[in-house]
Each structure stands twice: as C-alpha cells, then as structure tokens.
Image (cartoon, helix red, strand yellow):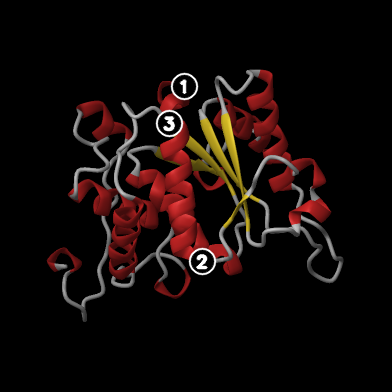
Amino acid sequence: MRKNLEYYTRYQVFLNYPFDREFSRMEDALQFPIVAANLLPLCAKDLSTPDRPRLDMLVAAISNCHYSLHELSRSKGEGNDNFARMNMPIETGMAMFHALHTQRRDHRCAFLVATPHDYQRFASDFAGLDPKCHNNEEDVLVGLVYEWLRDVVPSTILNLQPTKTVVERYHVYKDRLANVNGSGADDTPSHDERRELMYEVCQEVGWWDWRNATFGREEFPVLPLLWKAQRNSPLQN
C-alpha cells in the first residue's frame, strides 16, 4: 500500500470490481483511463500490509480516495454452495456512506453495470443514481470512466484529452501488453506489471507525470518488465 495515502487523497480513485477470470479483460479498461487522466488507481489488490486487518486497510483506502468506481455486474451465487460475493457490496456501502456523510464534498462515486436494467432487480436502491452501462465492451468502459472523471475532477488536476484519443492510447497499451513476458501463471502479466505498463504508456505522451519529481520516483519506483524475446521491442511501436 502507498506510504502516505492521505497525501494523495485528491488524486486517488478507489476501484471496486470482481477479481475473476471473466472480468480480467475489463479490469485493464477500468484502470487505464484513470492513469491516462494523470490520477492514481487504488484497489484491494494494492493493499498488502501484512500486519493490518484487511478491513482496516479498505477503510483507510476509501477514506483517502476522493473518487471511487464500483462495478455491479456480480449479483448471483456461484459454485456448489451458490454463495454470493459480499466483499464488493461491502466496499460499495463504505464508499457511499463516505460520500453521503460528507455531502459528496470529500468523495464522489460512480456505478458501472454490464446490462442496463438488471441492477433494478437486485439493487433497487440504485434507482435514480444512473449507473453507467458498459455492455462488457472495453472501449466503452474506457470512455465511460474517462468522461466521468472529466465531469467530476477539477480541470487543474485532470489531464484533459478527447475520449477517442484515450481509447486509441488504450489500444497501444493492449498491443504492448501482448509482448510482456509476465510473472503470473502461463507468463501472464501480474497486476503490478500491468499497472507499470500503463504508467509507461501514458508517461511517454506526457499524460502521467508522477515520476517527474523526486518524491514521485520514490513513491512510484519503476518495475522492470520482461519482454518476449521473439517479438520486436515494443518501444519501436
């Protein structure tokens, strides 16, 4: 977890989404536009302090994020026991309380759904909150997230770009990702390696500048990436 979450409060976006194989391709589309906006994504995968209860870390993370995005597509039980997932609703409730308790001054939430109407059956309290529907399409999700940030983040903080430009840069990221020899199962890139590549792809065009200062280089050290030897260097793209 970042050393000083409080320092980055105005720039951090908490992400609440399913950590499963089915959603994995959408995960990049959720995180990339945040980096492209020169902001800092933060999710449960980033909370790795071993001597703190996970719930304490989640409270600290959400409390120190001025924004959060919540993906609400998991509404049914799974496995032989048909258990529902409760972690995501818990995190959503924590963020909504933070937003309402501060009259949305210190926290702003957005909600994402895969289909336009199903949420009205399993989460009717969201009626009127206008969840944003991505239809399980990566480009749509990139655009929805970036445009929401553009609406709620002060222009003095946000990197302002046309949505189409951000989507095109996301495709550059995806092309390069295919060349990464990752440390995960079957050589897939890990969460940290994907995040590092997002930083680099956006830093190249001046969108993400957190490493331009000494404190940023200390807080966001470069994670070396290993590239697949049989392909051309992605830096030539």
Mark 3 surroundings within 10 Å by alpha-carbon count, few (fewer than 14), some (14 through 19), many (20 or more): some
Q: Which image quarter: residue 97?
A: top right
**Residue that mark 3 sits on:** 153
Amino acid type, label 1: Glu
Disc assigned to residue 6: 1
Amino acid type, label 2: Glu
**Residue that mark 2 sits on:** 137
Q: Which residue is at the front of the view, 17 or 122? A: 122
Element class at badge 2 = loop
Image quarter (top left, top right, bottom left or bottom right) of the C terminus: bottom left
Amino acid type, label 3: Val
Q: Is residue 231 left or right of residue 198?
A: left
- Do the numbered discs 1 and 3 sit on residues whose CB atoms are within 8 Å? no
| x then y, percent, for residue 38 | 32, 39
| x then y, percent, for residue 141 | 49, 57
Establish if 97 lies above or below 132. Answer: above
| x then y, percent, for residue 30 | 48, 53
Element class at badge 3 = loop
Q: Which residue is at the front of the view, 206 or 137? A: 137
Element class at badge 1 = helix
Q: Residue at x 72, y 36 (%)?
A: 93
| x then y, percent, for residue 157 | 33, 29
Disc assigned to residue 96: none
